[in-house]
Image (cartoon, rainbow, N blue to C red):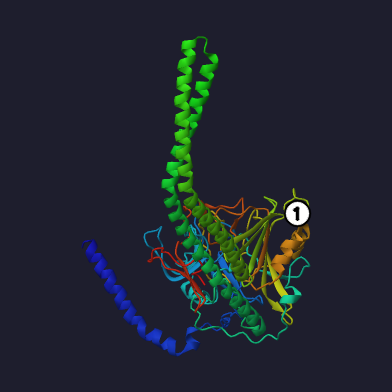
């Protein structure tokens, strides 16, 4: 019997076994007592979040993810991060883009359902296979059901922290963690949180979730209306500049002919002057009567030529006077319109920024403070850090919700702990130890225990060492929306923090193969902001085209 015959026999045997077991399986299904061991503990209820997700922490060493709400409740699941040479870099990210049905443009159009992008080079959260060890090319794979579940709870701009050792956020209060200024405070009574069932994309990007705080929502709506009211003026100013540029271009073309004639007349006048000077010098240097007579004759010709050149120059200047004056007025009008446009655009942008959470990054490496809003750079100034030669660590402070009557803010902090020298798993938790560079498979039934909370000591010490300039503090304290964050780190800003990103901070000393093996891609070049649905999205199929200056409103 050949190989094909053996395979046929095996298939027949498997089919017969399945038919034989079918009655027993059906009996067990209708008799749960027989299918469940006597000493088995009842399954723990699926954890639920009491509000929208505000933070996610991925642990590379534990191969799991925890998604937290403002109250500290968490949903956890197993993950599979980047394999050796494609490691998912430890660091600080935020969600840049979401797509339920995404396909990789790097790896043979591979399916990446429920994709939540972390970098434009291709690092993302998405549903995928979980073999029990790091196996991806840099992304973080999630269980499909879990990825589907959290997709509607997260929003663009939400902070995602990739840590080595797992750690949970801790609530923190500190005088240097800002809260809204008195002028922006509207006392309110929070109401129960009601999930938005229609928010399939996870809510409104770049906007705080204020469903629990109706007065705060009213304030935000008023600020958005104020910002929207400034957009037409900015658009009109931009349109005026374009119109005056066309006028200036036409006046430049009209003056080009007279300017060319004037330039030629000026050149002829200069040559005539040089001729007159040369003739006068020859008369002065003449030693004989004959030479003097010749020089005087040449001087007479030079004088006649100069008179003709003067006449032509006067005519050219007269012809050029009106076109030059028209061009000067057109240039002056365009420059004034440019200044008006800059003022109107700045005013509209400042009004819009009042509606957005603020991201502040303090780098000990560069001794500078950076601010971004709406994934755009806003400010870059020096900052004072006490003991600048001493390491400060990496600490991520997030304003997750309001407190009390809405006049205070609830902050939490996650600190990235140093990489451990060794990890030894206890016998009752895992069968094998796990290293970030190996592929030792962990037991999938290992319980997902809560990680230790962040130690507030180092985080508080980091805040104590940083002095934010008063004008910067006043700027970020005007409106403190949930989602506002402060990152303090020894590291500089990663090169991944380019256009259309929040801060990306990669921790040095950790493997970064998932970033190094992926070429940095520019962010999508076509964005659209829909004022009716407040939805910010990218359409890859549409080509960039001309739109009004503030079309995203």
Q: Residue sitting at 45 percent across and 16 percent down? A: 294
Q: Position of residue 240 (x, y in %)?
A: 50, 64
Q: Position of residue 37 (x, y in %)?
A: 52, 82
Q: Quadrant of residue 423?
A: bottom right
Helix, strand or loop for disc 1: strand
Quarter of the image with the N terminus is bottom left
Q: Residue furthest bottom?
A: 30
Q: Residue sitting at 40 percent across and 84 percent down? A: 25
Residue annotated with mark 1: 384
Nearer-the-camera pick, 168 or 288: 288
- Residue 438 appears in the picture as rendered: no
Along the horizontal axis of the image, is 408 left or right of 483?
right
Along the horizontal axis of the image, is 514 left or right of 190?
left
Nearer-the-camera pick, 404 or 304: 304
Say above or below: 201 vs 131. Answer: below
Q: Residue sitting at 39 percent across and 85 percent down? A: 24
Mark 1 neighbour density, 10 Å: few (under 14) some (14–19) many (20 or more) = some
Nearer-the-camera pick, 275 or 543: 275
Nearer-the-camera pick, 72 or 386: 386
Say above or below: 76 vs 339. Answer: below
Along the horizontal axis of the image, is 158 left or right of 9?
right
Q: Position of residue 160 (x, y in %)?
A: 58, 66
Along the horizontal axis of the image, is 463 left or right of 533?
right
Q: Residue furthest top?
A: 288
Q: Position of residue 174 (x, y in %)?
A: 77, 68
């Amino acid at each position: 019997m050949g190989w094909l015959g053996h395979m046929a026999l095996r298939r027949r045997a498997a089919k017969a076994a399945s038919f034989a077991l079918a009655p027993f399986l059906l009996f067990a299904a209708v008799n749960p007592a027989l299918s469940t061991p006597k000493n088995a503990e009842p399954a723990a209820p699926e954890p639920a979040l009491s509000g929208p997700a505000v933070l996610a922490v991925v642990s590379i060493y534990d191969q799991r993810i925890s998604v937290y709400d403002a109250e500290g409740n968490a949903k956890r699941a197993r993950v599979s991060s980047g394999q050796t040479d494609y490691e998912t870099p430890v660091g600080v990210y935020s969600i840049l883009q979401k797509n339920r049905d995404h396909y990789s443009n790097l790896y043979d159009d591979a399916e990446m359902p429920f994709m939540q992008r972390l970098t434009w080079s291709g690092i993302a959260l998405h549903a995928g296979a979980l073999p029990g060890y790091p196996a991806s090319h840099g992304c973080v794979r999630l269980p499909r059901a879990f990825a589907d579940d959290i997709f509607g709870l997260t929003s663009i701009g939400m902070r995602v922290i990739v840590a080595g050792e797992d750690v949970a956020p801790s609530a923190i209060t500190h005088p240097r963690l800002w809260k809204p200024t008195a002028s922006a405070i509207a006392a309110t009574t929070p109401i129960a949180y009601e999930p938005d069932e229609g928010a399939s994309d996870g809510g409104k990007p770049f906007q705080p979730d204020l469903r629990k705080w109706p007065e705060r929502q009213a304030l935000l709506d008023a600020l958005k209306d104020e910002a929207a009211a400034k957009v037409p003026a900015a658009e009109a100013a931009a349109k005026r500049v374009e119109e005056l540029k066309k006028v200036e271009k036409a006046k430049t073309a009209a003056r080009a002919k007279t300017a060319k004639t004037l330039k030629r007349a000026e050149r002829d006048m200069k040559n005539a002057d040089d001729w007159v000077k040369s003739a006068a010098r020859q008369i002065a240097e003449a030693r004989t009567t004959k030479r003097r007579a010749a020089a005087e004759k040449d001087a007479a010709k030079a004088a006649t030529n100069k008179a003709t050149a003067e006449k032509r120059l006067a005519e050219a200047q007269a012809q050029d006077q009106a076109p030059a004056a028209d061009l000067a007025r057109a240039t002056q009008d365009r420059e004034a319109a440019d200044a008006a446009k800059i003022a109107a655009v700045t005013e509209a942008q400042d009004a819009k920024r009042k509606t957005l959470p603020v991201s502040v990054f303090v780098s000990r490496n560069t001794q500078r403070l950076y601010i971004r809003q709406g994934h755009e750079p806003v400010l870059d100034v020096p900052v004072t850090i006490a003991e600048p030669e001493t390491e400060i660590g990496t600490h991520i402070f997030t304003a997750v919700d309001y407190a009390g009557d809405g006049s205070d803010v609830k902050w939490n902090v996650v600190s990235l702990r140093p990489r451990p020298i060794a990890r030894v798993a206890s016998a009752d938790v895992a069968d094998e130890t796990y290293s970030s560079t190996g592929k030792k498979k962990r037991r999938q039934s290992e319980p997902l225990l809560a990680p230790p909370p962040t130690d507030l000591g180092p985080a508080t010490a980091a805040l104590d060492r940083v002095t934010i300039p008063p004008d910067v503090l006043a700027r970020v304290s005007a409106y403190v929306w949930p989602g506002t964050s402060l990152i303090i780190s020894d590291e500089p800003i990663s090169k991944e923090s380019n256009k259309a990103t929040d801060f990306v901070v990669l921790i040095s000393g950790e493997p970064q193969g998932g970033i190094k093996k992926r070429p940095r891609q520019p962010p999508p070049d076509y964005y659209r902001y829909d004022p009716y649905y407040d939805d910010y999205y990218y359409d890859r199929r549409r080509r960039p085209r001309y739109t009004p200056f503030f079309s995203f409103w």
